[in-house]
Amino acid sequence: MWSKIKLAIPVSVKLTILYAAILSCILLLTSTLTVAGLYYMLYKQANSDISASMNSVNHYWAAGKPLDQNMLEANLLAPGVILKVLDQQNRLLIDSAPHAAGNRVLLEELDEDYCFTKFVPLKSPYLTIVRINRNYFFFTNQVVVQQSGESYQLYFLKPIAEEVHFIKNLIKSLLVTNALGLFVAVVSGIYISRKILRPIRNITETAKEIEINQLGKRFEVTDSNDELQELARTFNHMLSRIQTGFEQQRRFVADASHELRTPITVISGYVDILDRWGKQDPAALQEGISAIKSEAANMYRLIEKLLFLARADQSKQVINKVTVAMEPLITDIVQETRLIAPGHRIELPQNDPAAIYADLTSIKEMLRIFIENSIKYTPEGGTISVISQKADHYLDITIKDTGIGIPEEDQPKIFDRFYRVDKSRSKATGGTGLGLSIARWIAEQHSSSIQLTSKPGVGTTVTVKIPLIKQLG
């Protein structure tokens, strides 16, 4: 319904209108049922009293007793019931309440072919409500009896003027009460709805104030323990994630720019040197060419890692999983490591036969990243051990070194992009701070976990737990 209304109506007003409409229907229905119930009870009581009186008079008449004034002393009539007996000439013979209001007028109306006004169309074989001269009666149709050759007309009535007056006043009171109740409901509904919806207005106002440079602002969380509180908490959690992501992105752009600026600066410097003196100096020419090639290779590796992470963030990095036998893979990696790091002791004390469901290239890249980090931060002559062993339904691949170790406060951050424990050593080791981020992403894509323990001056141990698919033996 509200979708068809183009006016900008606040939610509090819509709720109040809906609430008031429902309440008015309930009040109207309740009042109608109350008045109808009173009319029904009044009718039933009058019907019962008049029926009882008619039965008593019938028994009295059937017993052969005369229809005269003495019958009024026999207590044949129920309280409030009036009996009128007329002869064939419509002369009033018996009137149990001669001084009741409306009696004379009633008889005159009855003489005129019973021209009376029906007040309420209640169904009964003989009972009707009539209004005569502002007096209301429950009235029976004419009852004719024969006795001693004479015909008599009997009329039973029950005055209900007070009851009708009470019902009229009740109807007026209900109308006033309903109108007052509806007014109070509208006013209180607006107040309550605005109070209930105040957190939403606060959220809206706070959302308008939040800018890209003010992501630290949060919505106020009330103690209402309701859906609005949950909404505020959800928005705050969302803002925290947006702020974290934005800060990471900003830091990532700044670090990437810094990493790319360094090799470009070096290349530009050597180009200037070559342009000035390198043409006539073969030694300077060779030094410049070697430096440019080295920096270009470093920049190429950095760009490759950046592209890898960009594809990973956009879920575009291709992963082709196949069954991979790990024993020969570990052997090949260890042999390659011995060739590129002849100054270190590379050990393979255990290499269990095992198979995993993985992307071969990615698994190789992940293990090489961990081994290369061990080589970078382990002095020459140190030991690097690679252990591959099955444990329950997992293959645990452990790379353990005797390097410089990682301080405890830095260990939770080493998987962040561009994070380095010792920034002064970054160029010497050739690292960009992206390798471990790539390794973590590869592990996540293979439902694997990474456990790291390290102690400065003792060494670092990294264990990757990869799910097995079958055993080879």
Image (tube, rainbow, N blue to C red):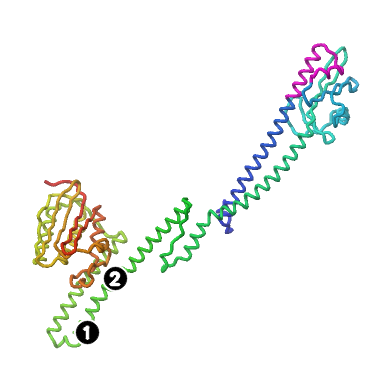
Mark 2 = which residue?
255
* Position of residue 264 in the picture relative to residue 125 (left or right): left
Residue at image location 13% in from the left, 67% down from the top: 379
Three-letter amino acid code at the position of disc 2:
Asp
149 versus 220 height, above or below: above
Left or right: 169, with 231 as reference point: right
Left/right of residue 133 with respect to residue 272 in the rendered view: right
Q: Of the residues shown, which amino acid type is indicated by label 1?
A: Asp
Q: Earlier in the sequence, mark 1 or mark 2?
A: 2
In front of the other: 302 or 375: 375
Mark 1 is surrounded, within 10 Å at the Cα level, by few (under 14), some (14 to 19) or many (20 or more) other residues, namely few
Q: In the rendering, at what x and y percent does residue 398 appear? A: 16, 56
The residue segment tinted magenta is: 48-76
Decide whether residue 241 is among the magenta residues.
no
Label 1: which secondary element: helix
Name the residue at 19% across, 70% down.
430
Figure quadrant of residue 110: top right
Q: State the SS at label 2.
A: helix
- Rendering coords of residue 178 (x, y %): 67, 45
Q: CA distance from mark 1 to mark 2?
A: 26 Å
Q: Residue tagged by mark 1? A: 272
Instruction: Kindly indicate the quadrant of the structure image that contains residue 436.
Output: bottom left
